[in-house]
């Protein structure tokens, strides 16, 4: 059921990095970066407190090193 509340509080789509600015990487490299970023976050905060955006932000910071 659609309600005004769901529209009012819905988050806008988030795309922090433009497609043209992304660095193409092989699937294995991206997967490794994501896992290496996710493991410490989950160990620190617990799996229920870590979101996809948290892992994505951590993976982006790891790939910039």
Image (cartoon, rainbow, N blue to C red):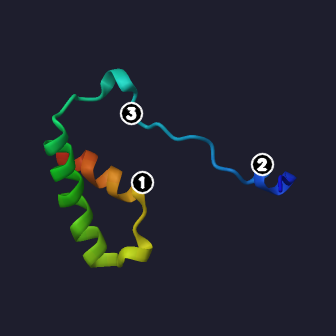
Image height check: is 12 above or below 55?
A: above
Tag 1 or tag 2, which sits nearer the N-term?
2
Q: Which mark is residue 31?
A: none
Image height check: is 52 above or below 43?
A: above
Please name whichever residue, 47 or 41, is drawn nearer the observer in this view of the structure: 47
- CA neighbours of label 1 inside 10 A, class few (<14), some (14 to 19), many (20+): few
Quarter location, residue 37: bottom left
Locate the N terminus and report the quarter of the image it occupies.
Answer: bottom right
Tag 2 or tag 3, which sits nearer the N-term?
2
| Image coordinates for residue 20, horizontal then vertical, percent | 34, 20
| Residue at x-position 27% and y-position 45% | 60
Q: Name the residue under label 2.
A: 7
| Residue at x-position 19% and y-position 40% | 27
Q: Name the residue under label 3.
A: 17
Outermost residue on the right side: it is 4
Label 2 to label 1, Cα distance in Å?
21 Å
Label 1 to label 3, Cα distance in Å?
12 Å
Locate the C terminus and report the quarter of the image it occupies.
Answer: top left
Please name whichever residue, 28 or 41, is drawn nearer the observer in this view of the structure: 28
Outermost residue on the front side: it is 1
Please name whichever residue, 16 or 36, is drawn nearer the observer in this view of the structure: 36
- CA neighbours of label 3 inside 10 A, class few (<14), some (14 to 19), many (20+): few
Image height check: is 6 above or below 13?
A: below
- CA neighbours of label 2 inside 10 A, class few (<14), some (14 to 19), many (20+): few
Q: Name the residue under label 1.
A: 53
Label 1, secondary structure: give it: helix
Quarter location, residue 42: bottom left
Label 3, secondary structure: give it: loop
| Image coordinates for residue 33, horizontal then vertical, percent | 18, 51
Number of numbered discs visible in the structure rendering: 3
Say left or right for 65 vs 59: left
| Image coordinates for residue 30, horizontal then vertical, percent | 20, 44
């Amino acid at each position: 059921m659609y309600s005004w509340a769901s529209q009012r509080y819905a988050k806008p789509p988030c795309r922090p990095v433009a497609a043209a600015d992304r660095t193409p990487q092989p699937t294995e490299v991206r997967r490794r970066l994501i896992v290496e970023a996710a493991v410490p976050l989950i160990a620190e905060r617990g799996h229920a407190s870590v979101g996809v955006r948290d892992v994505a932000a951590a993976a982006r910071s790891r790939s910039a090193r």
